[in-house]
């Protein structure tokens, strides 16, 4: 089951609705090897809430676009609860404007990115980043959305 939570006071006018957010999560989950229905939560929050999460859990006292909180380490049991994703809606909107993207489409990419983190993917080194970006590109294409890394080196992407 995928829960979508919207914090009080968060303006969702330019964000994807719950159905589209769930569609993005399911697509990323499936391409990352998950079967069935994923179990996770997607939270749309304000900048201050995400900054507090980033400070409290990652010791980085600044807002960021998306945070993922995996509930599993090591081998992922896709049938168990995967974790939580939090998006900072105002930050995502500003970032989308800077990137000349529709805010809802950019949020969809960030949900895909977050789900892949919950599934154990990371971008700590070049090989991991290339693998994760390839999954993001395939998921976004499957959703009929933009290439999230149009200027990245594609030599390692299959």
Image: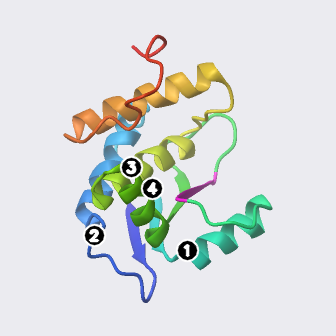
The label nearer to you, 4 versus 2, is 2
**On the image, numbered disc 2 is attached to which residue?**
14
Residue at 30% across, 38% down: 140
Q: Secondary structure at mark 2?
A: loop
User: Quadrant location of the N terminus?
Assistant: bottom left
Mark earlier in primary sequence (4, 2)? 2
Task: Please name whichever residue, 34 or 99, is drawn nearer the observer in this view of the structure.
Answer: 99
Q: Is residue 100 left or right of residue 53?
A: left
Against 12, residue 130 (above or below) is: above
Task: Please name whichever residue, 91 or 81, is drawn nearer the observer in this view of the structure.
Answer: 91
**On the image, numbered disc 3 is attached to which residue?**
99
CA separation, marks 3 and 1?
19 Å
**On the image, numbered disc 4 is attached to which residue?**
39
Residue 54 visible (yes or no):
yes
Q: Secondary structure at mark 3?
A: helix
Q: Which residues are magenta?
A: 65-71
Residue 47's label in the rendered image is 1
């Amino acid at each position: 089951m995928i829960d979508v939570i919207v914090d009080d006071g968060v303006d969702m006018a330019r964000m994807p609705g719950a159905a589209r957010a769930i569609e993005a999560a399911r697509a990323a989950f499936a391409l990352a090897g998950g079967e069935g229905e994923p179990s996770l939560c997607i939270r749309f929050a304000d900048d201050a809430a995400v900054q507090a999460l980033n400070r409290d859990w990652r010791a980085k006292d600044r807002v960021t676009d998306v945070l993922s909180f995996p509930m599993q380490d090591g081998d992922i049991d896709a049938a168990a609860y995967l974790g939580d994703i939090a998006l900072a809606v105002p930050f995502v909107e500003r970032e989308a404007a800077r990137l000349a993207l529709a805010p809802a489409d950019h949020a969809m990419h960030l949900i895909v990115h977050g789900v892949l983190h919950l599934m154990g993917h990371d971008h700590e080194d070049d090989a991991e980043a290339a693998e994760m970006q390839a999954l993001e590109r395939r998921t976004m294409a499957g959703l009929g959305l933009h290439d999230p890394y149009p200027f990245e080196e594609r030599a390692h992407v299959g």
